[in-house]
Amino acid sequence: MIRFKHSPLCRHMAFFVAFLIFAQLHNFAVQETVLTVQSCRELYLAGDFQNARICLENVLEKTDKADPANRIPQAELSLMLGAVNERLEAPDKAEEWYRKAKELLNGAPAVVNGVDFTGLPVYTKVFQPTPPPVEKPVEPKPEADAYELEMQGAKELYFKGEYEAVRGKLDKLAAELAKIEGRDTLKGEMYLLMGANHEQLKYKEISIRYYCKAKEILGANKSFQGLELKKLKWYKKTCPAGSQYAKAGTKKKGGGWIGTLLGLALLGGAIWYLFINKNSPIKKKEKGQYTSITVKVDVVFKGLNSKGNRKLRINNETKVEEDYVMTQNAFANATCAQAQLDKSYSFDITTTGNTIHIVQDYLNWDFYNFISPGTNYKMLCTEWSFSVQSYTYESGKADPGTPHPTNTNDLNLDYNNDCTEVSFRVDNCTTDVTLNFAAPTSTSAQAPKVYKAQQVKVKVSK
């Protein structure tokens, strides 16, 4: 008779059978956890956040946290508990669960299959921190830029031979510079250019006086790029009494002739402003009408728990026609900032006249997820912005200024007045707006360059 009690083969077979039983029990425990997580996820996607939280906490309590195989399931449970608490307006608890998930993930993507975390600010704070702001460079003083640009424009006109235009521009600049202290180099170059310009216009005495004033500020034989002093025959002439460049012993106290020059400059500037300038206040102004306007139109489509078809027409031209699906669950008091981003577009629209016609249709708007019985929400949001790129107006008439849209609020749409119920779940909605662009007024002078509007539609089904 053969006995196996102490046989090595018997002992090895016993260990092998025990290992197989343990492995099967371990796999069953992991599969049970996954199946239970799926049940919790279904409650979350149905909007039953209270029961979803209870379900998740129960599953997490039963999970063997010491088992390395449960690290990812623990992370997913923590992520969903963070989302549930955020939906239930418990941000501190939500952040605690998110950070626990982040520790478990150790750099792995913070995602859960079928769950959309878009629009959850606490989730974004933990997993997508905002980068530090970039310091903007210090901008130069606008006054200095304006004077330099005016002087540069006068130089360009001079080298083109447009001497009458140069005189008007420099007279205006002299009147502005007379009001401020400093800027001596700019003033010296201005007087030098005034002297050269009057030499081209054959005004000898005035030309010499401006040359002498330039020498007093800049020094003798000092010029700016492009202006050759050797070609200016009156620059070498003797300066009149009162200038430091007159003959020795003739310098007199005070600076009466300098005041005369500034006075002449002010007078010339006043004459130009009142009688030559096209925007003169004593001239009868007749503003022109806009003949064309080019507007950049930016459109952003968002939503929650919605599907259907949308169509956008601008000035009778179809710009967008497509199906849309927004899977993220909607909830009470949701805003556009919390909505799921779907698509964005940008169009340059040129119109003759001063209007743009916009028609937007949402067709067969349905719930993406629908539970019955229960409360269901769906939301659509369209964000608009308009910025005028260029415009033209009637030739020969005063420029009315950059136009701006006056009725962007008309793009706002509410469910009760602008949607038609097709069935208990499905609606058709339409926005039909003619945007009017008007000339700026005294009250709109400080208006923004970009005009924005939001269009929100929300439906609740119980």
Image (cartoon, rainbow, N blue to C red):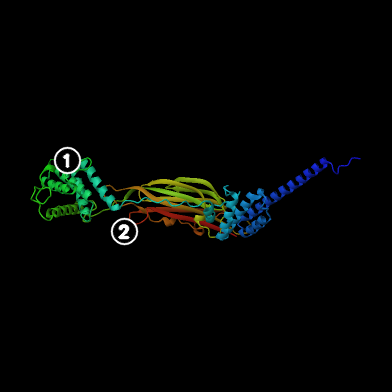
**Label 1 neighbour load within 10 Å: few <14, some 14-19, many 20+:** some
- Could you say where residue 181 lies in the image, as x and y percent from the top left? 22, 55
In this rendering, position of residue 253 left or right of residue 418: left
Question: What amino acid type should be assigned to the residue bearing mark 1?
Answer: Leu
Give the distance between the C-alpha atoms of the residues marked 2 and 1, in whole angstroms. 47 Å
Residue situated in front as seen by the camera: 76 or 212: 212
Disc 1, SS: helix
Which residue is denoted by mark 2 in the rendering?
442
Image point 15% across, 42% down: which residue?
A: 200
407 up-or-down from 238: above or below: below
In terms of sequence position, does the residue under pointer 2 or pointer 1 come before the other?
1
Image point 40% across, 54% down: which residue?
A: 451
Which residue is denoted by mark 1 in the rendering?
229
Q: Are dots 2 and 1 in contact, CB under 8 Å?
A: no
The quarter of the picture where the C terminus appears is bottom right
Image point 82% across, 41% down: which residue?
A: 8
- Could you say where residue 40 lies in the image, as x and y percent from the top left? 64, 54
The mark lying in front, picked from 2 and 1, is 1
Disc 2, SS: loop
- Could you say where residue 414 lies in the image, as x and y percent from the top left? 49, 58
